[in-house]
Image (spheres, rainbow, N blue to C red):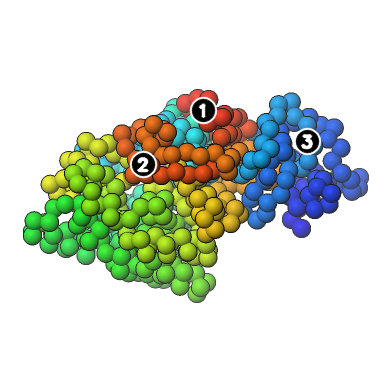
Amino acid sequence: MRLVYTNRTYILSPFAYIFKYQLLLLTGTGLGYNSGAMSYDLVIKGGMVVTAEATWPADVAIQSERIAAVGLDLPGEREIDATGKLVIPGGVDVHVHLEMPIGRFRSADSFFSGSRAAALGGTTTIIDFVEAAPDQPLVEALAARRALADPQVVIDYALHMTLGPAEIPRLDQLPDVRAAGCRSFKLYMAYGFCLSDGQMMQALEAVQAVGGMPVVHAENWDVICTLVARHLAHGRTQPHWHPRSRPDIMEGEAVGRVIDIATLAGAPLHIFHISCAAAAQQLAAARQRGLPVTGETCPQYLFLTQEAYEAPGVAGALPVCAPPLRPLADQAALWAALGRGDLQIVATDHCPFTQAEKATGLADFSQIPGGVPSIEMRLAAVYDGVRRGLLTENQWVALCCTNPARRLGLPGKGEIVPGFDADLVIFDPQREKVLSTDTLHEQVDWTPYAGLRLQGWPIVTIRRGEPIVVNGEFVGQAGSGRYLLR
């Protein structure tokens, strides 16, 4: 039986509903049932609580931004009826790119529009990125990114610090970054941020030395560049050639290689946006050896295939992202990996660009700005795996809420436990939504999921005890989110 202290010095068992569906309390004077004498600020009544570990009928009480109690017949000054609904922790998306500059473009969602769309989709915490300018102190870059985000965000957020080749001589700054509350560090095996294997080892050792978590984009950039040049030299300029320049076998190779380097460095590791069976298999094999590695996949790899690149004109350019979409067999393999626990997190890599911006690369697929919008549909999309029998409800919550909070060190997030932040979602398993630019709220003029019908959608989102989405309508305010010191 799991016992957790509440902020009222009681000891709470979330599994005590077994005993006549009452919350069992152990006080300093003895054992007794909750009398319900205290009235809480807000109580979610009559729902089915779903966590990563268990499912049971209970009320959830909130006091002063925190979860105060979980039980039955809890009284509240305000109450929300969740009868027939699921009550889950707020979603945690550990991989988003808001207002991210790429070349001459900037990703379409601002910190306000992106965090609002996240909230409407049941996500209450996100992690974005910091990229320092040349010779800019890393803590200064962190402060600048916070200054951009803080007045806009409607949910809580944290940041990953990007370490490219220019940062290798400045790894002695990592203790200051860690002291400023930034615990995770993005390492690339692609693009201008690509680290050589030797630089990767140095970065992993430095991150490990400050107790940080390395998060890695794993692809083989040398092979990619060679294949891109070859295709373009033969006039193969269409989006069709995008996945053929980033083969799955080389993504698997890169995942295996960085795991080996991390093992040598004695560092833990989290692999971003795994797109294919080859990469998932490398991760599973490493975990079977007891290595401290985890991996994520994203909705685009679970719902789209590389056939999307065959669409004519700009439509074929829209879903360009990296790693690319893969064949249907890889999609099935990723769902199976989630069900087995071989992949531990579903994040989004949300990084949308407009149709006009995507169209600028039609004469050269390698110049299409990469990224797709998924920040709003993630929670409901993964629930589709529950409806299809591929996941349990508890796995759904683990993948979208609990595992990302635990792995990336987000304090008080991702669980329904007294003393944790009151980040909660009331999810209607019967609510249907057909995805389109009219029903989604990302600040972009297309969605790769147009026409996708999902059954199950969040109807109330509560961030630190404050409802910010009610009956599917956003009622929060810009700047009400907080930066999370990790």
Q: Position of residue 230 (x, y in %)?
A: 12, 62
Residue at x-position 54% and y-position 58%: 389
Mark 3 surroundings: few (<14), some (14-19) or many (≥20) residues within 10 A: many
Report, in whole angstroms, how far the alpha carbon at label 3 lies from the one at label 1.
Answer: 27 Å
Q: Residue at x 47, y 26 (%)?
A: 478
Tag in front: 3 or 1: 1
Q: Residue furthest right?
A: 29
* Residue 74 disc label: 3
**Marked residue nearer the N-terminal end (2 or 1):** 2
Give the structural element (helix, strand or loop) at label 3. Answer: loop
- Label 1's element? strand
Give the Cα distance between marks 3 and 2. Answer: 42 Å
Distance, label 2 to label 1, CA atoms, is 21 Å
Amino acid type at circle 3 is Leu
Percent position (x, y) of residue 394?
Answer: 61, 54
Query: In this rendering, is residue 373 above or below 329?
Result: above
Task: Please report contact status of discs 3 and 2: CB closer than 8 Å, yes or no.
Answer: no
Q: Position of residue 294 (x, y in %)?
A: 48, 61
Dot 2 amino acid type = Ala
- Badge 1 crowding class, 10 Å Cα cut-off, few under 14, some 14 to 19, many 20 or more, is few
Kindly report which numbered mark, 3 or 2, lies closer to the viewer in this rendering: 2
Nearer to us: label 2 or label 1: 2
Which residue is the site of mark 1? 473
Tags 2 and 1 touching, CB below 8 Å? no
